Image (cartoon, rainbow, N blue to C red):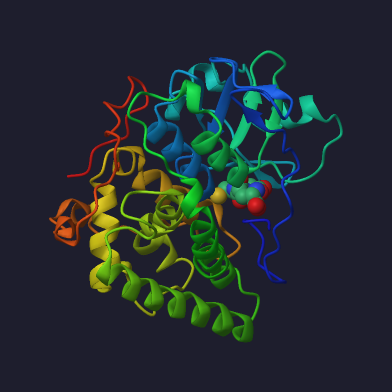
């Protein structure tokens, strides 16, 4: 998909080009030595956001550092590219640790001549400057389940062994119809494919609405990866997908249970304190000129709705199970508060 081109075919996603696995014991080749890896993200990107949330929920901030790209990609050789800029906190327009302006430099360092997509999230080895993984799903599950010894005391079990099957089963429908469904809807090349995608999206949201009417979290009775995966799309829905992607049968704020669930998580440490709605709006509306040629950014909705009471405690469950909430967001990683 090229965000700045008018879509002519259905969106296709390729397998991740770099998929080295990093675990605390290094059993797949790379060990998660503290300070060795840098996670490059955009606050706008829902796939990167999952890894940002897992990193924070697990307390891996000291183990793996964070580089935040400008939400508005720069056009380099005709394609939008993630870059570091002064405006978004990178002095001289370079990431201070990796020394690069464009993320693609780390891709090219790892694979000279590489001409595939350059995406976030990307895990970069600070020793070599090489990207080692842009596999967002593996990065989030591995950080949740394989970085244990580096995690904070009280970190939740986001991927409990006994619930993995259910998490993956829910995740498949959420991925196809919601996470990727909003992109299939927004980049539909014709009416027929739009109708199919938008129909599946709202059928799945209706089903999730019912499920979440009776239970606080998607699987089990505390936060799991299933919630992280769904929430990153819910956060962006009314601000970007509803208007720009024509996902406008309903807003999330018109679904009583889904909206209360989304607010509950927003107000839980690890979720809302990693959310930047300005970056989200700027990225989607300004970069996706194939479907928004003027690049004009929509103003709404009023973000203060995220802070209203949700009353979801009444359903039972507790966000961190036997664990505890993460502490304050580290200096330099704060997002602008709402309101
Ligand atoms: N690369 C992954 C997902 C990550 C992703 O799509 N990231 C977007 C931002 S939300 C990106 O970096 N796109 C730039 C590109 O692929 O050229 C996939 O397609 O499965």
In the image, farthest residue toward the right: 113
Q: Is residue 75 above or below residue 35?
A: below
Picture coordinates of residue 292 (x, y %)?
52, 63
- Up/down of 198 relative to 135, above or below: below
To which quarter of the image does residue 131 belong? Answer: top right
* Observer-nearest of 75 and 67: 67
Instruction: For residue 88, say whether it is visible.
Output: yes
Q: Nearer the viewer, residue 28 or 52?
A: 28
Q: Is residue 1 left or right of residue 286?
A: right
x and y percentages locating residue 91 in the rendered image: 49, 17
Vertical position of residue 334 compared to residue 178: above or below = above
- Tell me the residue at 57%/23% (across/down): 38
- The residue closer to the viewer here, 337 or 22, is 22
Q: Position of residue 144 (x, y in %)?
A: 49, 37
Quadrant the N terminus occupies: bottom right
Residue at (66, 39) in percent of width and height: 134
- The residue under the point 41% across, 44% down is 279
- In this rendering, the count of numbered labels is 0
Image position of 87 with respect to 50: above or below: above
Q: Position of residue 41 (x, y in %)?
A: 53, 36
At a point 49% along the width and 68% down the height, the residue shown is 245
The image quadrant of residue 128 is top right
Instruction: In this rendered view, identify the residue nearer to me: 89 or 23.
Output: 23
Instruction: Give the quadrant of residue 336.
Output: top left
Q: Is residue 91 left or right of residue 4?
A: left
Where, quadrant-wise, is the C terminus in this rendering? top left
């Amino acid at each position: 998909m090229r965000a700045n081109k008018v879509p002519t075919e259905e969106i296709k996603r390729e397998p991740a080009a770099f998929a080295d696995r990093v675990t605390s014991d290094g059993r797949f080749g790379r060990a998660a030595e503290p300070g060795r890896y840098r996670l490059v993200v955009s606050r706008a990107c829902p796939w990167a956001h999952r890894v940002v949330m897992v990193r924070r929920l697990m307390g891996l901030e000291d183990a793996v550092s964070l580089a935040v790209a400008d939400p508005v990609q720069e056009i380099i050789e005709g394609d939008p590219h993630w870059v570091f800029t002064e405006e978004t906190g990178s002095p001289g327009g370079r990431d201070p640790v990796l020394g690069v302006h464009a993320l693609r430099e780390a891709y090219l360092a790892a694979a000279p001549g590489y001409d595939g997509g350059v995406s976030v999230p990307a895990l970069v080895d600070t020793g070599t400057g090489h990207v080692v993984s842009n596999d967002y799903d593996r990065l989030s599950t591995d950080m949740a389940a394989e970085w244990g010894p580096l995690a904070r005391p009280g970190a939740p079990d986001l991927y409990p062994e006994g619930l993995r099957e259910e998490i993956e089963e829910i995740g498949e429908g959420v991925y196809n119809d919601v996470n990727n469904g909003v992109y299939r809807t927004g980049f539909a090349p014709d009416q027929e494919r739009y109708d199919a995608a938008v129909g599946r999206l709202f059928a799945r949201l209706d089903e999730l609405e019912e499920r979440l009417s009776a239970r606080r979290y998607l699987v089990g009775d505390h936060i799991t990866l299933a919630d992280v995966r769904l929430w990153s799309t819910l956060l962006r829905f009314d601000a970007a997908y509803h208007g720009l992607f024509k996902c406008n049968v309903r807003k999330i704020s018109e679904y009583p249970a889904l909206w209360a669930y989304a607010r509950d998580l927003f107000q839980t440490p690890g979720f809302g304190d990693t959310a930047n709605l300005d970056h989200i709006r700027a990225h989607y509306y300004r970069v996706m000129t194939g479907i928004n040629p003027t690049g004009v950014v929509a103003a709404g909705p009023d973000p203060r709705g995220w802070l209203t009471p949700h009353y979801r405690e009444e359903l039972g469950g507790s966000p961190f199970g036997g664990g505890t909430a993460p502490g304050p967001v580290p200096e330099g990683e704060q997002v602008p508060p709402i309101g």
